[in-house]
Image: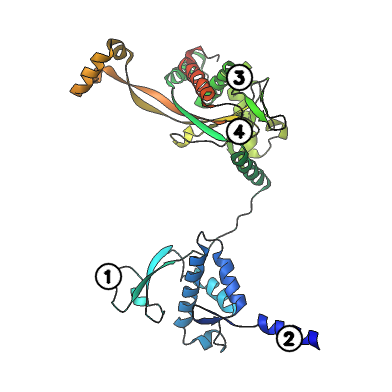
């Protein structure tokens, strides 16, 4: 008998109606509102807004007894009906609004907007309203791998960023010359991969990774550059192996072949596993500059923006400035350089993201200087 009485008491407790915001509501309905508001950045305010919108919606009909089957208590089915009715017209599209409430706590629909001065009998409250309409899009297998790897990279690898403006006028001349003399078309990305491979050969410290097991920096024996490219399944980084031993045309052939296989979803694991350095080029999307997340276990990744024409001081004008006194005197007059002393140059913004465990900012700057030197002397590229 004692067990039976305890079970009955527990059942009565579970069925007990709770009072929220001065209204009677079943615990299951209140839990549903809380779960619905949990995805918001401010769940407490979102739950309050949902309850207010729910009661406003229920009071629009003749009476609460009619909407809740004569129970005078909000049940779970009332909340479900409210959330599914008319695409949540009571809460959709209004992230934050100022509502006017009467002294008894009821909402005044005529003053729900901020237009016009509030009445003296009303008091203002800030209410956060969430849009409950959304669609869950499941991640594919590749997207899940990308998410886990990038999250692990940002968490485990201490990122540091170094940016430099690189003269790309030599690359522009090289591309035009290859078309005129050899009828071969090469892309800016092919030239960037070629220049990066030569710079990695000159500054081998950037062509490395950090071995957590032994706690040491490990330099790669070969220059294998991963090229980030978009695919239907997500971002992939197929590899151009031994890039420092290939010409610009050979690099271009490899990149186009890998890009075609990526679009068709036919990349092999052997074509994506490994790599010693990664290049992410968003210049074709008119992006000026950005910072890329490292591709573990590699120690560095290069983010390249678009090429833009920038005004610079000509070499002749720089040579005419013999000492700092002349420069300071010209600066005081407000005419440091004339229009004849200025020219334009095609430049790109290159940002190197490094793992501070195996290199520092000085090493990144040295590599960027080597990369800029290769790009500036693009006339010496092997086609």
Q: Establish if 364 lies above or below 86.
A: above
* Dot placed on the residue nearer the N-terminal end, 3 or 1: 1
Task: For the C terminus, give its image quadrant.
Answer: top right
Task: For the N terminus, give its image quadrant.
Answer: bottom right
The residues tagged by marks 4 and 3 sit, at their Cα atoms, a distance apart of: 28 Å
* Dot placed on the residue nearer the N-terminal end, 1 or 2: 2
Q: Nearer the viewer, mark 3 or mark 1?
A: 3
| Residue on which disc 1 sits | 116
Q: Residues within 10 Å of mark 4 (few under 14, many from 20)?
A: many
The residues tagged by marks 1 and 4 sit, at their Cα atoms, a distance apart of: 59 Å
| Residue on which disc 2 sits | 8
* Dot placed on the residue nearer the N-terminal end, 2 or 3: 2
* Dot placed on the residue nearer the N-terminal end, 4 or 2: 2
Q: Nearer the viewer, residue 241 or 178?
A: 241
Q: Secondary structure at mark 3?
A: loop
Side of 216 relative to 347 (left or right): right
Q: Residues within 10 Å of mark 3 (few under 14, many from 20)?
A: some
* Dot placed on the residue nearer the N-terminal end, 4 or 3: 3
Q: Measured from the top left, where is residue 220 in percent x and y?
A: 67, 22
Q: Nearer the viewer, residue 273 or 255?
A: 273
Figure label count: 4
């Amino acid at each position: 008998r004692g067990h039976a009485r305890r079970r009955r008491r527990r059942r009565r407790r579970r069925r007990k109606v709770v009072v929220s915001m001065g209204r009677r509501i079943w615990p299951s309905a209140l839990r549903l509102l809380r779960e619905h508001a949990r995805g918001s950045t401010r769940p407490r305010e979102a739950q309050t807004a949902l309850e207010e919108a729910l009661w406003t919606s229920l009071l629009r009909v003749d009476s609460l007894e009619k909407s809740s089957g004569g129970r005078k208590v909000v049940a779970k089915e009332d909340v479900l009906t409210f959330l599914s009715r008319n695409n949540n017209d009571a809460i959709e599209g209004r992230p934050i609004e100022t509502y006017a409430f009467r002294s008894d706590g009821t909402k005044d629909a005529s003053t729900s907007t901020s237009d016009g001065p509030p009445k003296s009998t009303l008091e203002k409250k800030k209410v956060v309203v969430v849009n409950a309409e959304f669609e869950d899009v499941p991640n594919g297998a590749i997207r899940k791998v990308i998410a886990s790897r990038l999250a692990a990279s940002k968490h485990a690898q201490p990122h540091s960023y170094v940016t430099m403006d690189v003269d790309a006028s030599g690359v522009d001349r090289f591309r035009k010359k290859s078309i005129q003399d050899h009828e071969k078309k090469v892309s800016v990305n092919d030239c960037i991969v070629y220049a990066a491979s030569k710079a990695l050969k000159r500054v081998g410290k950037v062509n490395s990774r950090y071995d957590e097991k032994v706690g040491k920096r490990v330099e790669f024996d070969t220059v294998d550059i991963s090229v980030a490219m978009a695919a239907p399944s997500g971002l992939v980084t197929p590899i151009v192996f031994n890039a420092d031993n290939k010409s610009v045309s050979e690099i271009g052939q490899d990149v186009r072949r890998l890009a075609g296989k990526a679009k068709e979803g036919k990349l092999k694991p052997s074509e994506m596993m490994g790599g010693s350095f990664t290049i992410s080029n968003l210049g074709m999307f008119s992006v000026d500059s950005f910072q890329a997340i490292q591709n573990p276990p590699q120690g560095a990744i290069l983010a390249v923006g678009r090429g833009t024409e920038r005004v610079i001081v000509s070499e002749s004008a720089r040579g005419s400035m013999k000492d700092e006194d002349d420069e300071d005197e010209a600066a005081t007059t407000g005419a440091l350089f004339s229009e004849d002393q200025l020219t334009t140059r095609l430049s790109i913004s290159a940002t190197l993201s490094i793992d501070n465990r195996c290199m520092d900012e000085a090493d990144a700057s040295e590599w960027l200087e080597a990369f800029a030197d290769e790009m500036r002397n693009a006339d010496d590229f092997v086609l």
